[in-house]
Image (cartoon, grey):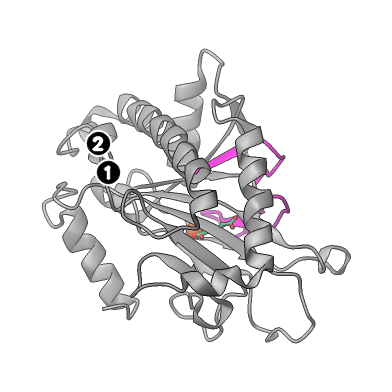
Amino acid sequence: MGLYAVDYLAPNAGLEFVASLHEFGFGILKNHPIPQASVESIYAHWLNFFQSTEKYNYRFRSSFDGYFPPEVSETAKGCAERDIKEYFHFYHPWGICPEALRPELIAYRQQANALAEALLGWIEAYSPPEVAALYHEPLSTMIRGSEQTLLRVLHYPPFQGSEPSQALRAAAHEDINLLTVLPAANEPGLQVLTQAGEWLDVPCDFGYLIVNIGDMLQEASGGYFPSTTHRVINPPPSAANVSRISLPLFLHPRPEVVLSERYTADSYLQERLRELGFK
Ligand SMILES: O=C(O)CCC(=O)C(=O)O
Ligand SMILES: [Fe+2]
């Protein structure tokens, strides 16, 4: 079976969703409780923000919160070129954010966090017993009250024609955190690498919610749930002049949460940030 959307309200939703996470590292939900109107409103407001010069008033502080312009955007591990994107990192309660945009980001974070806790409950319930025995605390409480959870608003600008030929909107990478919750973007482009080594388009009908496993859940589950490589490819010529906006919420455990015999969430994160050259 390929990657397909699971109906959140169907009686067997948890089972199917967790089976998809085990097989692909990705699960797609439809009929989920996050209101599409709030996602659309955030996309519209933040497209305005990225198109204005106001963004330069919120330049990033250290490697944490604020606006990251294209010239500092990430270079994925093993890649020569930077990704073709700019983004804003919003942490709650301590991160900077334009005041006018803050309330709806906070509201969105709360809704997506609550859903993520419910989904982690499914993941735990449908983990084989020998995998569930590895969890040092319920998966859903690992993220509860975490100030490390990161909401990233991403803007992939229209193409100018001067982009380096090797660069992608987002080069192949894995997410470091526990779980990522991502509403379908306004434009396609997200792909996952299958176990057979093929790139598969992630179904991206507007209104779908995409959930993927991060490295920390791979670690905590002894590899049962794979942190799958994914990327965002460049637009076809017909959509080259269209911005793409996306809104991943990277759910991070509280720093002291024990992931495995080897790592706490904090020691894991510090090691990965050092590898990426941030520390
Ligand atoms: O923009 C997207 O659809 C995915 C972004 C992503 O994978 C990331 O920021 O880690
Ligand atoms: Fe990602």
Q: Residues within 10 Å of mark 2 (few under 14, many from 20)?
A: some
Q: Amino acid at mark 2?
A: Val
Q: Residue furthest top?
A: 11
User: Does the magenta portion include 206?
Assistant: yes
Q: In the image, which residues are magenta?
A: 185-211
The mark total stands at: 2
- Quarter of the view holding residue 177: bottom left
What residue appears at the point 28 percent right and 50 percent down from the top-left corner? Answer: 147
Residue 70 % position (x, y)? 57, 78
Q: Amino acid at mark 1?
A: Ser
- Residue 254 seen in the current view: yes
> Along the line of sight, which residue is nearer the eye, 70 or 9?
70
- Quarter of the view holding residue 275: bottom left
Tag 1–tag 2 contact (CB < 8 Å): yes
Q: Which residue is mark 1?
A: 221
Q: Quadrant of the C terminus?
A: bottom left
What residue appears at the point 48 percent right and 48 percent down from the top-left corner? Answer: 102
Residue 69 % position (x, y)? 54, 76
Whichever of labels 1 and 2 marks the residue nearer the N terminus, that label is 2
> Along the line of sight, which residue is nearer the eye, 192 or 188?
188
Q: Secondary structure at mark 2?
A: helix
Q: Which residue is mark 2?
A: 131
